[in-house]
Image (cartoon, rainbow, N blue to C red):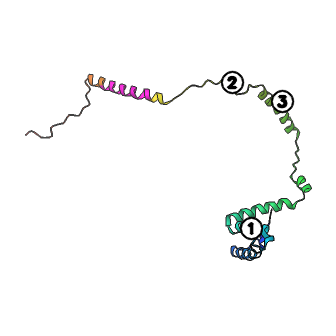
Amino acid sequence: MLDYYQILGVESTASVTEIKSAFRTLAKLYHPDKNENGKEFFTQLLKAYEILCDHKTRSRYDYQYKLFKNNTAIPRAEKQTQNTKTWRFDDKEMKRRQYYNEHFKNKVKQQEPLSDIEVNKTNYNEFKYVFYAIPLAVILFLFLVKMAQSNGLNYSVKPTNMTRNK
């Protein structure tokens, strides 16, 4: 991974104005119109400038570069011993694992795969019950009103005479 701070010749704590001024001075020296041999370096210079001037891309670059430096700082032989886990089991854990391997895995192997089992699918639509229930409820309500009226129970309101006879 390229060190864009080193390419521009600034420190990692440099401000945007310092990065811009460093870019301008190096761009004058290595621009392809003035220096034909500096074309590759100029492309690296442009990329470094674009990344380090934008706050979001600069913070992303700093994070990735930090990870890169940390991973490459440790020699490969030391990395392997550092990342290797040593597993230690007591007898209880070993017995638990053996029980699991013998019982549960064997049961799973004996079961039929789900794709072989036929599933009876029914077309269940809960709205059909609503379409049946509403007309039945209306009919029942009208029947009860009719029965109440036929028994002499009349719940209609009659106007009363509010004037007094003297």
Residue position for label 2: 117
Tell me the element at label 1: helix
Residue at left offset 82%, top offset 62%: 69
Circle nearer the N terminus (2, 3): 3
Residue at left offset 15%, top offset 40%: 162
Instruction: For marks 2 and 1, give the CA distance.
Output: 60 Å
Instruction: For marks 3 and 1, give the CA distance.
Output: 59 Å
Does residue 84 belong to the magenta stretch?
no
Quarter of the image where one finds residue 74: bottom right
x and y, in percent, of residue 103 in the image? 81, 29
x and y, in percent, of residue 123 in the image? 55, 26
Does residue 140 belong to the magenta stretch?
yes
x and y, in percent, of residue 59 in the image? 71, 64
Q: Which mark is residue 48?
A: 1
Q: Which residues are magenta?
A: 131-145
- Give above or below for 128 relative to 67: above
Instruction: For marks 2 and 3, give the CA distance.
Output: 25 Å
Quarter of the image where one finds residue 8: bottom right
* Depth check, front residue: 110 or 161: 110
Compared across the picture, whether 140 is left or right of 25 comes to: left
Image quarter of the N terminus: bottom right
Circle nearer the N terminus (2, 1): 1
Compared across the picture, whether 44 is left or right of 76 comes to: left
x and y, in percent, of residue 139 in the image? 36, 25
Quarter of the image where one finds residue 115: top right
* Depth check, front residue: 53 or 137: 53
* Depth check, front residue: 163 or 1: 1
Q: Which mark is residue 102?
A: 3
- Kind of residue indicated by mark 2: Ile
